[in-house]
């Protein structure tokens, strides 16, 4: 199987106030379709920055980014927008729902984005299907203000899934949720990988990380693959010591 | 084509959601735009009306623009007769023979000596003879119930030249046979006098051998502050010989001829009068009130334009302000939409859609309301206030109001869109 994503030598330098700071330092990463990858690392190590490079929110300063065998390192914004729509789904720690829209409308936002056009009926079918996948179809007409954090995050996941993305990017999606709710959210994300979608999850939770197929460790902008110590020991066994920080950020 | 229409439709849907989501914001900017357009239209219509008003007052006294007036018909023997004969039965030229008259008790000093307005006192009236000796016309007479007024005898209907506005009763009818008792149409000041003072119905004119019994048949607005009455020349000539009407020794006589812009009467009449007066030079002067007032009108227009612009700027500031009040929220929304793949061009479309939908709707409403209001005002007040007739809807003002409002709205919408388009999505989503 060919790889879906190939990062090589990705560097991101922040031209800050005084001296430039290297946030990502020659990051290399390969992700295959249907694979799940956890990115772990200390706060400030550059995990979110890496994710925003992966999701074409931002560009690397050097290095190559290959998607589906195509070099997209220097893709113009117009095409990047199209790829974000067709290939990527995003979930953030803050749910980023539009509070003036219902759950269904928030999900439909990813369909009504100027990239192609679906008739209303088909839009509705897809939206309800996505909400159903995350188990909150009954909340379709609710606005975010009337939903719990876990429900809101699942609306965000439905929004990420509604276009059947090839890659799901999640940046601490459980950071603002309690353990049990977090587990439900991770379940919903992992479910997508069964349909061939790659999942890249940034997390501080060792249990959630352990449920991913691979774990990569980011430290001061340098990425290292973590080889499972207890291969085949099951999800309950801690694979290795993970950096720990305080409560949810 | 499909892609374009998808973008367009997306922009419309998202714009519609934005309008519904921010009802108060939308309402406030609609109110700003509505009032702005309305105010601009009202101010400009007001300028038009004020201009008409000024002009119509001048028309009453000087004549309608484009007509002509022959001032100072010579007092040579036969001149009055020549004027009356030449103009008899004509509508394109009307002669006005003016003089003073007294209505009321005989042998008394009139309540308004000299034909003064009733709330003014012009004092005694001196009449001077050729040798320069002046005497008080009413010397030795006691004050009594008599009104002195200016009367103007007409050879025909003067209103095509001076559009006197009817206030009550009738205007003179020149088609009927003349009556022995002259019918008088008063101006408002004269009507006031007859309301205030009950005077015997007896009219005296210097030079007339007998007194006459006038009938008052109507009141008009003629723009004259002195008491004034109009009557048919052929009803006056029963009592006063034509030549006496231009006799300088009988005092205050004056003859003018109002002429249509181009009429053969002009040259005929002037030729006759020249012959009678031994070749004295005379010509009819065209009336051009608008030109005389141009400086004044220019100033007025500038003032009104400044007012309109000010109002418009205030309205636009309102629209802009309301738009900018939600920048933070919108920047986040736009960044999120970009994250799910919405192209920047569609963001611009959203802003345009929101503003065009609300802006054009509001503008149409504002223009509709002001057109209707202007129509209502002219229909209700038009007949009695002729200056309202011909007041045009100030389309240029309306349209510039709409454009300014739309520009302000779009500017207010584009500022967050441009900011959202400029910063990396990651930065917004990190905040
Ligand atoms: N726009 C920015 N301006 C200034 N500094 C930035 C900006 N973006 C990132 N950084 C810096 O880059 C570094 C990496 O940030 P990043 O958000 O990627 O870390 P992270 O690993 O996601 O941290 P956390 O686990 O707390 O989310 C941090 O030191 C941060 O201060
Ligand atoms: Mg982060």
Image (spheres, coloured by chain):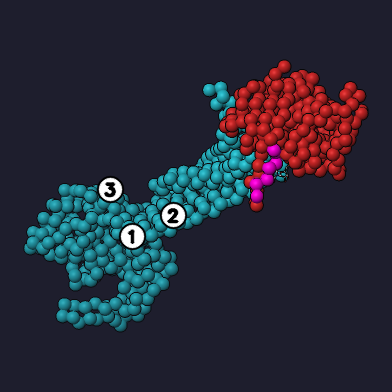
Circle 3 — which element?
loop
Q: CA distance from mark 2 to mark 1?
A: 15 Å
Which residue is label 3 attached to? B175
Residue at image location 39% in from the left, 62% down from the top: B188
Mark positioned earlier in the residue sequence (2 or 3):
3
Residue at image location 50% in from the left, 55% down from the top: B310
Mark positioned earlier in the residue sequence (1 or 3):
3
| Residue placed most toward the observer, B353 or B391 | B353
Subunit bearing disc 1:
B
Subunit bearing disc 2:
B
The answer to whether the residue labelled 1 contacts the one labelled 3, judged by CB atoms less than 8 Å apart, is no
Q: Which residues are magenta?
A: A19-25
| Labels 1 and 3 within one chain | yes
Q: CA distance from mark 1 to mark 3?
A: 42 Å
Residue at image location 31% in from the left, 76% down from the top: B107
Q: Which chain is red?
A: A
Q: Tell me, yes or no, whether the highlighted magenta stretch contains residue A23.
A: yes
Mark positioned earlier in the residue sequence (2 or 1):
1
Q: Quadrant of ligand 1?
A: top right
Q: Quadrant of residue A228?
A: top right
**On the picture, is A85 further left or further right than A223?**
left
Which residue is label 2 attached to? B305
**On the picture, is A91 further left or further right than B267?**
right
Which residue is label 1 attached to? B295
For discs 1 and 3, the disc positioned in front in the rendered view: 1
Residue B83 locus on image (x, y percent): 17, 56
Q: Residues within 10 Å of mark 3 (few under 14, many from 20)?
A: few
Q: Which chain is cyan?
A: B
Circle 2 — which element?
helix
């Amino acid at each position: 199987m060919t790889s879906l994503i190939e990062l090589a030598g990705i560097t991101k330098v922040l031209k800050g106030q005084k001296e430039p700071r290297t946030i990502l330092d020659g990051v290399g990463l390969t992700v295959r379709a249907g694979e799940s990858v956890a990115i772990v690392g200390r706060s400030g190590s550059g995990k979110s920055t890496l994710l925003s490079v992966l999701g074409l929110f931002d560009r690397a300063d050097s290095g190559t980014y290959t998607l589906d065998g195509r070099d997209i390192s220097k893709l113009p914004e117009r095409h990047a927008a199209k790829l974000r729509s067709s290939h990527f789904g995003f979930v953030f720690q803050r749910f980023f729902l539009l509070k003036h829209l219902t759950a269904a409308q928030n999900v439909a936002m990813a369909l009504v984005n100027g990239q192609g056009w679906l008739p209303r009926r088909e839009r509705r079918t897809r939206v309800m299907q996505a909400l159903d996948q995350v188990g909150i179809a009954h909340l379709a007409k609710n606005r975010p203000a009337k939903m719990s954090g876990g429900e809101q995050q699942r609306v965000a996941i439905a929004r990420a899934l509604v276009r059947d993305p090839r890659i799901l990017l999640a940046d601490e999606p459980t950071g603002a949720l309690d353990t049990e709710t977090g587990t439900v959210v991770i379940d919903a994300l992992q479910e997508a990988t069964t349909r061939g979608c790659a999942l890249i999850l940034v997390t501080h939770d060792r249990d959630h990380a352990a449920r991913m197929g691979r774990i990569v460790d980011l430290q001061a902008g340098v990425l290292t693959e973590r080889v499972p110590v207890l291969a085949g020991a099951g999800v309950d066994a801690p694979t290795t010591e993970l950096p720990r920080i305080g409560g949810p950020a | 084509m499909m892609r374009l229409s998808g973008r367009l439709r997306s922009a419309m849907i998202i714009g519609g959601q934005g309008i519904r989501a921010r009802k108060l914001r939308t309402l406030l900017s609609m109110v700003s735009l509505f009032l702005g357009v309305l105010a601009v239209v009202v101010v400009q219509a007001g300028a038009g009306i004020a201009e008409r008003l000024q002009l119509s007052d001048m028309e009453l006294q000087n004549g309608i623009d484009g007509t002509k007036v022959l001032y100072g018909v010579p007092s040579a023997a036969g001149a009055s007769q020549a004027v009356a004969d030449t103009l008899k039965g004509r509508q394109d030229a009307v002669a006005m023979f003016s003089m003073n008259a007294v209505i009321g008790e005989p042998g008394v000093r009139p309540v308004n000596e000299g034909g003064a307005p009733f709330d003014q006192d012009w004092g005694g009236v001196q009449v001077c003879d050729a040798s320069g000796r002046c005497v008080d016309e009413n010397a030795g007479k006691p004050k009594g119930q008599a009104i002195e007024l200016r009367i103007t005898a007409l050879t025909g209907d003067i209103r095509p030249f001076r559009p006197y506005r009817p206030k009550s009763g009738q205007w003179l009818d020149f088609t009927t046979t003349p009556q022995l008792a002259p019918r008088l149409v008063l101006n408002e000041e004269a009507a006031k006098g007859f309301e205030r003072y009950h005077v015997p119905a007896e009219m005296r004119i210097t030079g007339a051998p007998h007194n006459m019994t006038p009938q008052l048949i109507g009141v008009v607005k003629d723009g004259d502050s002195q008491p004034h009455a109009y009557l048919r020349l052929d009803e006056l000539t029963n009592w006063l010989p034509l030549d006496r009407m231009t006799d300088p020794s009988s005092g205050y006589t004056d003859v003018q001829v109002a002429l249509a812009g181009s009429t053969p009467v002009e040259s005929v009449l002037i030729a006759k009068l020249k012959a009678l007066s031994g070749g004295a030079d005379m010509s009819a002067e065209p009336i051009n009130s608008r030109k005389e007032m141009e400086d004044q009108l220019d100033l007025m227009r500038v003032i009104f334009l400044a007012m309109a612009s000010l109002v418009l700027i205030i309205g636009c500031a309102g629209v802009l302000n309301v738009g900018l009040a939600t920048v933070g929220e919108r920047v986040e929304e736009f960044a999120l939409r970009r994250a799910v793949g919405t192209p920047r061009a569609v963001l611009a479309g959203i802003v345009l859609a929101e503003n065009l939908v609300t802006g054009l709707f509001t503008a149409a409403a504002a223009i509709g309301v002001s057109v209707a209001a202007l129509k209502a005002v002219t229909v209700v007040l038009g007949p009695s206030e002729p200056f309202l007739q011909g007041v045009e809807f100030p389309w240029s003002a309306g349209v510039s109001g709409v454009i300014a409002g739309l520009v302000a709205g779009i500017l207010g919408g584009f500022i967050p869109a441009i900011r959202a388009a400029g910063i990396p999505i990651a930065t917004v989503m990190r905040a």
